[in-house]
Image (cartoon, helix red, strand yellow):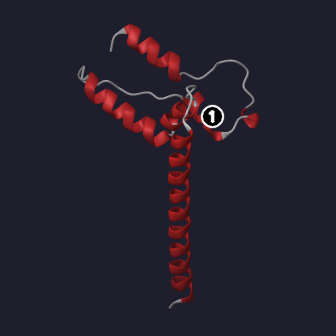
Amino acid sequence: MNAISRRAITGIFAPARQGINLLSHDLSQVQQMRGIRVKVRNGNLEQALAVMQRVMQSSGIERLIKQEQTHHIKNSEKRILARKILERKIKSQDHARKLQTILIKKVRGL
Protein backbone atom coordinates (compact mmCIF):
# COMPACT_ATOMS: atom_id res chain seq x y z
CA MET A 1 0.00 0.00 0.00
CA ASN A 2 1.61 3.26 -1.00
CA ALA A 3 1.97 6.25 1.27
CA ILE A 4 -0.75 8.33 -0.41
CA SER A 5 -3.49 5.71 -0.05
CA ARG A 6 -2.37 4.93 3.51
CA ARG A 7 -2.56 8.63 4.41
CA ALA A 8 -6.02 8.89 2.79
CA ILE A 9 -7.37 5.88 4.68
CA THR A 10 -5.92 6.95 8.02
CA GLY A 11 -7.18 10.49 7.45
CA ILE A 12 -10.71 9.18 7.00
CA PHE A 13 -10.81 6.63 9.80
CA ALA A 14 -8.19 7.90 12.26
CA PRO A 15 -9.35 9.04 15.70
CA ALA A 16 -9.53 12.71 16.47
CA ARG A 17 -6.70 13.64 18.87
CA GLN A 18 -8.34 16.70 20.38
CA GLY A 19 -9.74 16.73 23.91
CA ILE A 20 -12.64 14.31 23.73
CA ASN A 21 -15.19 13.81 26.45
CA LEU A 22 -16.31 10.23 25.86
CA LEU A 23 -19.27 10.63 28.18
CA SER A 24 -20.89 13.14 25.84
CA HIS A 25 -20.47 10.96 22.74
CA ASP A 26 -22.74 8.11 21.77
CA LEU A 27 -21.50 4.69 20.73
CA SER A 28 -21.41 5.42 17.00
CA GLN A 29 -19.07 8.36 17.51
CA VAL A 30 -16.80 6.26 19.71
CA GLN A 31 -16.69 3.61 16.96
CA GLN A 32 -15.74 6.30 14.47
CA MET A 33 -12.89 7.48 16.68
CA ARG A 34 -11.40 3.97 17.00
CA GLY A 35 -10.77 3.65 13.30
CA ILE A 36 -10.23 0.57 11.18
CA ARG A 37 -6.87 -1.00 10.48
CA VAL A 38 -6.33 -3.71 7.92
CA LYS A 39 -3.02 -5.45 7.27
CA VAL A 40 -1.92 -5.90 3.67
CA ARG A 41 -0.27 -9.30 3.42
CA ASN A 42 2.13 -10.18 0.62
CA GLY A 43 1.21 -6.99 -1.22
CA ASN A 44 -2.33 -8.30 -1.90
CA LEU A 45 -4.32 -5.06 -1.90
CA GLU A 46 -7.51 -6.63 -3.29
CA GLN A 47 -7.77 -9.03 -0.37
CA ALA A 48 -7.09 -6.20 2.10
CA LEU A 49 -9.86 -4.09 0.54
CA ALA A 50 -12.30 -7.01 0.77
CA VAL A 51 -11.45 -7.48 4.44
CA MET A 52 -11.84 -3.74 5.04
CA GLN A 53 -15.26 -3.76 3.40
CA ARG A 54 -16.42 -6.66 5.61
CA VAL A 55 -15.12 -4.91 8.73
CA MET A 56 -16.84 -1.66 7.74
CA GLN A 57 -20.16 -3.46 7.22
CA SER A 58 -19.96 -5.32 10.51
CA SER A 59 -18.92 -2.26 12.54
CA GLY A 60 -21.69 -0.04 11.17
CA ILE A 61 -19.47 2.60 9.60
CA GLU A 62 -21.05 1.94 6.22
CA ARG A 63 -24.48 2.80 7.65
CA LEU A 64 -23.09 5.98 9.20
CA ILE A 65 -21.66 7.03 5.85
CA LYS A 66 -24.99 6.39 4.12
CA GLN A 67 -26.79 8.45 6.79
CA GLU A 68 -24.56 11.40 5.95
CA GLN A 69 -25.95 11.63 2.43
CA THR A 70 -26.60 15.23 1.51
CA HIS A 71 -28.57 14.77 -1.69
CA HIS A 72 -32.35 14.99 -1.88
CA ILE A 73 -34.33 11.80 -1.37
CA LYS A 74 -37.61 11.58 -3.25
CA ASN A 75 -40.81 10.97 -1.30
CA SER A 76 -41.32 7.64 -3.06
CA GLU A 77 -37.86 6.52 -1.92
CA LYS A 78 -38.65 7.68 1.62
CA ARG A 79 -41.83 5.60 1.63
CA ILE A 80 -39.97 2.53 0.38
CA LEU A 81 -37.27 2.97 3.02
CA ALA A 82 -39.87 3.50 5.75
CA ARG A 83 -41.71 0.34 4.67
CA LYS A 84 -38.48 -1.69 4.71
CA ILE A 85 -37.57 -0.36 8.15
CA LEU A 86 -41.04 -1.19 9.46
CA GLU A 87 -40.89 -4.72 8.01
CA ARG A 88 -37.46 -5.25 9.58
CA LYS A 89 -38.72 -3.97 12.93
CA ILE A 90 -41.81 -6.24 12.86
CA LYS A 91 -39.68 -9.24 11.87
CA SER A 92 -37.23 -8.51 14.69
CA GLN A 93 -40.06 -8.22 17.22
CA ASP A 94 -41.54 -11.48 15.99
CA HIS A 95 -38.20 -13.28 16.37
CA ALA A 96 -37.79 -11.81 19.87
CA ARG A 97 -41.26 -13.01 20.82
CA LYS A 98 -40.51 -16.53 19.55
CA LEU A 99 -37.20 -16.63 21.42
CA GLN A 100 -38.88 -15.46 24.59
CA THR A 101 -41.48 -18.23 24.44
CA ILE A 102 -38.76 -20.82 23.80
CA LEU A 103 -36.72 -19.57 26.75
CA ILE A 104 -39.76 -19.56 29.03
CA LYS A 105 -40.52 -23.17 28.08
CA LYS A 106 -36.90 -24.17 28.78
CA VAL A 107 -36.90 -22.44 32.15
CA ARG A 108 -40.17 -24.06 33.17
CA GLY A 109 -38.96 -27.44 31.95
CA LEU A 110 -41.73 -28.02 29.45
Work out whether residue 18 or residue 74 is closer to the camera in this orientation and state it. 74
Looking at this rendering, what residue extends furthest in the top direction?
4
For label 1, the residue is: 30
Q: Position of residue 58 (x, y in %)?
A: 45, 42
Secondary element type, mark 1: helix
Q: In percent of the image, x 51 and y 20: which residue is there?
A: 12
Q: Residue at x 39, y 8 (%)?
A: 3
* Number of marks in picture: 1
Q: Where, quadrant-wise, is the N terminus in this rendering?
A: top left
- Above or below, comparing residue 46 to residue 99 in the picture: above
Q: Does 108 sit left or right of 37 as displayed?
A: right
Depicted 47 relative to depicted 98: above or below: above
Q: Residue furthest bottom?
A: 110
Quadrant in the picture for residue 21: top right
x and y, in percent, of residue 56 in the image: 44, 35
Structural crowding at the residue carrying mark 1, measured as other residues with C-alpha within 10 Å and reported as few (<14), some (14–19) or many (≥20): some
- Three-letter amino acid code of the residue under disc 1: Val
Residue 52 place in picture, x, y as percent: 38, 31
Whether residue 14 sits left or right of residue 6 in the image: it is: right
Q: Position of residue 79 (x, y in %)?
A: 55, 47
Task: State whether residue 20 is above or below residue 95.
Answer: above
Quarter of the rendering containing residue 44: top left
**Residue depicted at 65% across the width and 18% down the height:** 17
Q: Considering only vertical position in the picture, is 100 above or below 106?
A: above
Residue drawn 51% across the image and 41% down it: 77
